[in-house]
């Protein structure tokens, strides 16, 4: 990271490096992100609607690969971004962390109050997953 200039720090390719506070603020502004994990030996990236809750990323899901990853405390990646094609500007925030199945009934009641609607309402998504971040980084172009 280049910190020798008077402007914001940049990475090796000249992209502005976002501070941890900026990354956390951006995570609070979005509703759709992408979770990445290994499923049956292959990388899988899926969109989810999410909210931030107590510093964790939370989302609803049904039985399947995302819930399996959480029940196995899998290492996951999570990404959000925004892009403006008209002026070729944007940003991206990447989170590395551990997925967990939320099982505590009191916490589930609290999470339901977030008003989070699933990406697709075609099946009941009654399970909650949290991602506990261990690394957060971001870039702006």
Image: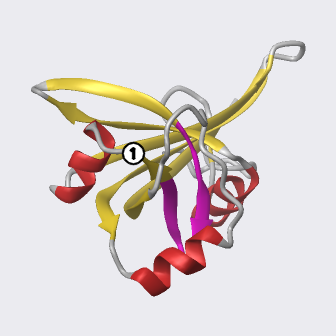
Judged left or right of residue 62, residue 110 is: right
Q: Is residue 16 visible?
A: no
Q: Residue at x 60, y 64 (%)?
A: 52
Specify the farthest residue to the right: 86
Q: Is residue 27 visible?
A: yes
* Residue 57 drawn above or below residue 14: below
The residue identified by callout 1 is: 62
Q: Which stretch did the figure color magenta?
A: 48-59
Q: Residue at x 81, y 14 (%)?
A: 85
Judged left or right of residue 114, residue 120 is: left
User: What is the x, y in percent for residue 28?
Assistant: 70, 59
Q: Nearer the viewer, residue 132 or 8?
A: 132
* Residue 119 drawn above or below residue 25: above
Q: Residue at x 38, y 28 (%)?
A: 45
- Prevailing secondary structure of the magenta residues: strand
User: What is the x, y in percent for residue 67?
Assistant: 29, 49
User: What is the x, y in percent for residue 58?
Assistant: 50, 60
Specify the farthest residue to the bottom: 106
Does the magenta-highlighted stretch encompass residue 1? no
């Amino acid at each position: 990271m280049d910190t020798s200039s008077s402007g914001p720090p940049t990475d090796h390719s000249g992209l502005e490096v976002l501070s941890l506070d900026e990354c956390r603020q951006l995570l609070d502004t979005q509703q759709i992100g992408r979770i990445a994990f290994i499923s049956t030996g292959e990388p899988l990236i899926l969109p989810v609607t999410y909210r931030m809750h107590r510093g964790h990323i939370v989302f609803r899901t049904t039985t399947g690969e995302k819930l399996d990853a959480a029940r196995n405390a899998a290492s996951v990646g999570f990404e959000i971004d925004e892009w403006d094609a008209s002026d070729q500007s944007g940003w991206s925030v990447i989170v590395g962390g551990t997925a967990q199945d939320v099982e505590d009934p009191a916490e589930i009641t609290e999470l339901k109050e977030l008003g989070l609607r699933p990406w697709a309402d075609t099946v009941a998504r009654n399970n909650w997953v949290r991602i506990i971040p261990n690394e957060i980084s971001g870039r702006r172009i």
